[in-house]
Image (cartoon, helix red, strand yellow):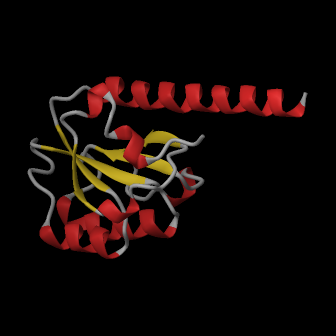
């Protein structure tokens, strides 16, 4: 069983994280949470990652290029931390871009601890993988 963006909506620390665009892409598989702190991400990801950005490196006017890069690299989705000095809100054109590509775009309040969210996602992926491996082992016996 793989973890999808839809599965994340049931997590405790995801309660305050809101899906703002791309609901038709919630079936995308999440391979790992990745916190991006570079202006581009292509060279750092494999595909399937859920990208978190704080805005420290990604200004609001550059987000359109970033989301296009995420879509091209087949990331699971993008979580943008908002409500700080970097990104106050997600631009409407970005919402439209994510909707058109069925690319899940989430908005996360700045005061939610990123470490708690990424740890919970990592735990879910790890448990899911362990469960899958155990099931495969039983099937091969």
Would you place residue 97 above or below residue 88 in this image? below
Would you place residue 78 above or below residue 11 in this image? below
Say which of 139 and 53 sits in front.
139
Farthest residue to the bottom: give it: 100
Say which of 87 and 136 sits in front.
136
Q: Name the quadrant containing residue 66.
A: bottom left
Say which of 2 and 89 sits in front.
2
The quarter in which the C terminus is drawn is top right
Q: Position of residue 19 (x, y in %)?
A: 24, 51
Q: Position of residue 56 (x, y in %)?
A: 25, 45
Residue 22 visible? The answer is: yes
Relative side of 134 to 15, left or right: right
Q: Name the quadrant containing residue 89.
A: bottom left
Would you place residue 122 above or below residue 104 in this image? above
Relative side of 115 to 85, left or right: right
Identify the residue at image location x=37%, y=68%.
102
Say which of 116 and 130 sits in front.
130
Q: Position of residue 21 (x, y in %)?
A: 24, 62
Would you place residue 60 above or below residue 117 in this image? below
Identify the residue at image location x=44%, y=67%.
71
The quarter in which the N terminus is drawn is top right
Q: Position of residue 106 (x, y in %)?
A: 26, 50
Farthest residue to the right: give it: 141
Residue 37 visible? The answer is: no
Identify the residue at image location x=50%, y=46%.
30
Relative side of 123 to 5, left or right: right
């Amino acid at each position: 069983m793989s973890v999808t963006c839809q599965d994340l909506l049931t997590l405790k620390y995801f309660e305050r994280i809101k899906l703002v665009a791309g609901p038709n892409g919630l079936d995308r598989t999440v391979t790992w949470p990745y916190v991006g702190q570079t202006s581009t991400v292509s060279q750092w990801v494999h595909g399937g990652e859920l990208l978190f950005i704080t805005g420290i490196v990604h200004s609001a006017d550059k987000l359109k290029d970033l989301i296009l890069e995420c879509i091209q690299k087949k990331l699971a989705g993008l979580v943008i931390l908002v409500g700080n000095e970097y990104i106050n809100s997600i631009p409407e054109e970005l919402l439209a871009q994510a909707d058109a590509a069925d690319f899940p775009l989430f908005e996360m309040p700045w005061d939610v601890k990123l470490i708690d969210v990424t740890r919970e996602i990592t735990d879910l992926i790890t448990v899911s993988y362990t469960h899958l491996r155990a099931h495969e082992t039983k099937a091969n016996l």
